[in-house]
Amino acid sequence: MPLWLAGKSPAPRPALDTERDCDVAVIGGGIAGVTTALLLQRSGAAVVLLERGEVAGGATGFTTAKVSALQQTKLTDVRRLHGADGAAAYAAASAGALERIAAFVGEGIDCAFERLPAFTYAAGPAQEDSVREEVEAARDAGLPVELVDAAPLPFPVGVAARLDDQAQFDPVRYTRGLAAMLEAAGGVIHEGTAIVKVHDGSPCRLTTDAGVELRARDVVVCTNYPLLDRGLFFARTEAARSYLVAARIPAPAPPGMFISAGEPTRSLRPYTDPEGGHWVLVGGEGHTTGSSDAQPERYALLEDFARAHFDVIEIPYRWSTQDASPVDKLPYAGAYTPLSRHLFVNAGGQKWGMTNGTAGALILAERLAGGEHPQAGTFDPIRLSARALPGLAKENLQVGAHFVGDRIRPADADAAKDIAPGSAAVLRSSGVARTGVFRDDDGTVHAVSIRCTHLGCLLRFNAAERSWDCPCHGSRFDVDGAVLAGPATEPLERREA
């Protein structure tokens, strides 16, 4: 359970249960979707926002919530793949998103918004060149980043990049505040409403999992991983998981947001809760979705790090999150396909969704109002960078290897009776068909097909989160087959074990 979602949830908003029309339908109730919807509603459009779960209950509620234009070594990567102009545009978009967030907070959102410096630090001599390169890339991109020889951390570091006047906040309180602004402006929000089909036309038609249709002039897909198969986003986006723990400590944590320049990543930030309690959030231990690295030990390593460097009282919160990362290191904000006239996307936050989701919202709000945002070309989903082609080829070779290799992998067990409580195994049911079986702690057996309902890859069990995860495109399902994360929209087939 994330620290941000530990409090009492507001009363759920009703699901869409009758046909209706609107100017713009926005799919996704995280920071990207709610910001997009609010900006469009304020520009004069009649907006309906649709969320499968609850507002801020997805990836937004599972983030560290750093709001910064200094993002580990991101500008180095962007400059390598898109040149100096691409890096400058990305930096400008991130800085602009920070100021847009600050402006919304200034309208009265109580979300523990706090201005702090951001640091990318060298956790050892091998990371120092990466820090220096990031400082150079950031300065060339127009950011006033300093190279410093220390950071206010309770352990020694090598050189660090420092960018002042960045920010952090509580992402759930912020996004719920935006949602309240959206409704005050006349926008409509439906929670518990999963979209399973979108027809791009005049009008666009959206169909929910309950079979209800919504008609809209335009549709903006703001899910963490692009929801629809068109546009080939699944072939050029990698899904990755990372882990966080929140440790309660007796005194304030160091005043800054910190992340190491290399692996293993260690990300830190302070937090003071509404009752005045002090916390430090420690993140890292990332891996691709569906990897065998998804084990409870990931949390243990972060907890050990926290206890080694802080006077920890307790660690009551631990959670993991999933990020969609385009292989060319830039988010998506624009038309869904070259032929799309009314279907748009704001996704691919690549672990920095607070700024990237907001930047994408600004780009799309301008476009749907008939204007042209200065960073629209950089975030254009239809872009093609020749320098990114090797990464694209590597990603899809790995997908192919999973698709074929998992089908010839031996089954894990012969029968459900062989599976210990708290464990899962894959049983061969007939031919090459596989059944995934999880036995929970009280002995109850949960059995599902492990054929992903997206494109048919075979799922792997995530022991850290007790879910079935797709190693090809990142879809996730609970032990009874319900969709936890897309691009899949249909649940897994339930089976007998």
Image (spheres, helix red, strand yellow):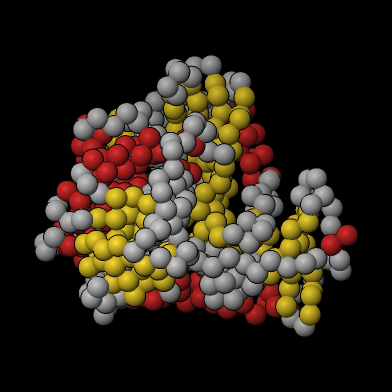
Q: Nearer the viewer, residue 389 or 273?
A: 273
At horizontal 58% and vertical 34% (from top left) the residue drawn is: 317
Task: Say above or below: 186 vs 448.
Answer: above
The image quarter containing residue 90 is bottom left
Q: Nearer the viewer, residue 138 or 404?
A: 404
Q: Nearer the viewer, residue 13 or 312?
A: 13
Residue 94 is left or right of residue 225, and the answer is left
Residue 185 is left or right of residue 303, and the answer is left
Task: Say above or below: 391 vs 273.
Answer: below
- How many marks can you see? 0
Task: Say above or below: 151 vs 359.
Answer: above
The image quarter containing residue 257 is top left
Q: Residue furthest bottom?
A: 431
Please say whether residue 212 is visible from this viewpoint. Answer: yes
At horizontal 63% and vertical 56% (from top left) the residue drawn is: 478
At horizontal 68% and vertical 70% (from top left) the residue drawn is: 449
Please say whether residue 345 is visible from this viewpoint. Answer: no
At horizontal 44% and vertical 17% (from top left) the residue drawn is: 276
Q: Nearer the viewer, residue 186 or 264?
A: 186
**Quadrant in the picture for the N terminus:** top right
Q: Residue 247: x and y, percent?
A: 56, 28
Q: Residue 357: x and y, percent?
A: 32, 52
Q: Residue 409: x and y, percent?
A: 75, 74
**Quadrant in the picture for the C terminus:** bottom right
Q: Residue 486: x and y, percent?
A: 49, 63
The image quarter containing residue 467 is bottom right
Residue 292 is left or right of residue 113, and the answer is right
Q: Residue furthest front?
A: 18
